[in-house]
Amino acid sequence: MPMNPRLLRPLTAGFQALRVGLVAYWPLNETAASGDVTAEDWTKRGNDLTSNNSVLSTTGKVGNGRELVAANSEYLSRASNTDLQFGNGDWSIAAWVYPTATGTGEGFVVGKDQSGGREFLFSVITNTSTTSNKVAATIFHTDGTNVSVVGPSVNNADFLGKWYHAVVVHASGVVSLYLDGALASGSGSTPTVNRASGKTFAATATPFNVGRRSFSGFPNHLDAVVDELAKWNRALSATEISRLYNNGNGIDLRR
């Protein structure tokens, strides 16, 4: 696929490397005041996301973001391709997420999961208990078994009304979850996990969804604002993740 020429343009010192291996980047900066407005993949690799049920724009972490409302069954989606698959090679996926409700169970920031094609889940978990809100990711092997990384349990008062920068990285069989610029830590967290011995992570034809999964009867729609969603076909380093976080300010990879 053609590469956006701007990806080759030098960046401010220290940020240029963040574009290496970038295969999809959705700034989610469009103005979407009504209807279904496409979310553009800035890399120009053809991975634009279709809006379903009017995913509207709102104030994001950097410029605009998109607000997913579970009650309206809102989500963004695209058919699978090699850019959007996870699988056994190294990869990274990052997003800013602002949960807007608790007590709703598990909602999916990214869901590539359906019967016969289970691959990847990037979740915000909000339970009726006031102490068990968390960010997590589940990665499936080709035989349907899975491993998960989990962030710390957080009280309702500390979970809502806050932006989280979440990055999931796979590097040579090790999956890691980074939150707010550092490896996840705290009560109940499982920041790293190994791919099961002798097994392979799945890469499937299941659609790439933002705000839900395709599993019949169990879409698990998300209540959150999502911004600066990006995927790489390599493992980001801890230093690069810290730069993406940018002391809590985030960065716009288009600049």
Image: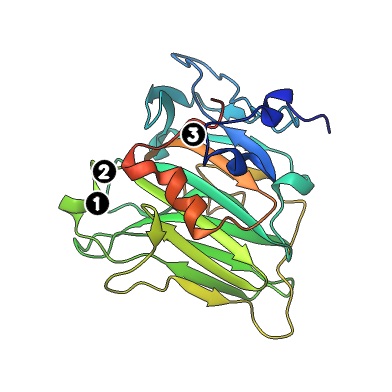
One can see residue 200 in this view: yes
Of the pair 253 and 145, the residue shown nearer to us: 253
Q: CA distance from mark 2 to mark 1?
A: 6 Å
Q: Name which quarter of the figure residue 185 lies in.
A: bottom left
Q: Amino acid at mark 1?
A: Phe
Does 144 sit above or below residue 36? Answer: below
Determine whether label 2 and label 1 are within 8 Å by CB.
yes
Q: Nearer the viewer, mark 3 or mark 1?
A: 1
Q: Earlier in the sequence, mark 3 or mark 2?
A: 3
Label 2 sits on residue: 162
Label 1 sits on residue: 159
Q: Give the class, few, some or many, for how many residues have Cα within 10 Å of label 1's Cα (few <14, many ≥20).
A: many
Of the pair 167 and 50, the residue shown nearer to us: 167
Q: CA distance from mark 3 to mark 2?
A: 21 Å
- Apparent side of residue 53 relative to residue 226 in the rendered image (left or right): right
Q: Position of residue 120 (x, y in %)?
A: 61, 59
Q: Amino acid at mark 3?
A: Glu
Return the mark for residue 74.
3
Question: Quarter holding the C terminus?
Answer: top right
Return the mark for residue 60.
none
Q: Amino acid at mark 2?
A: Lys
Q: Residue at x 28, y 66 (%)?
A: 153
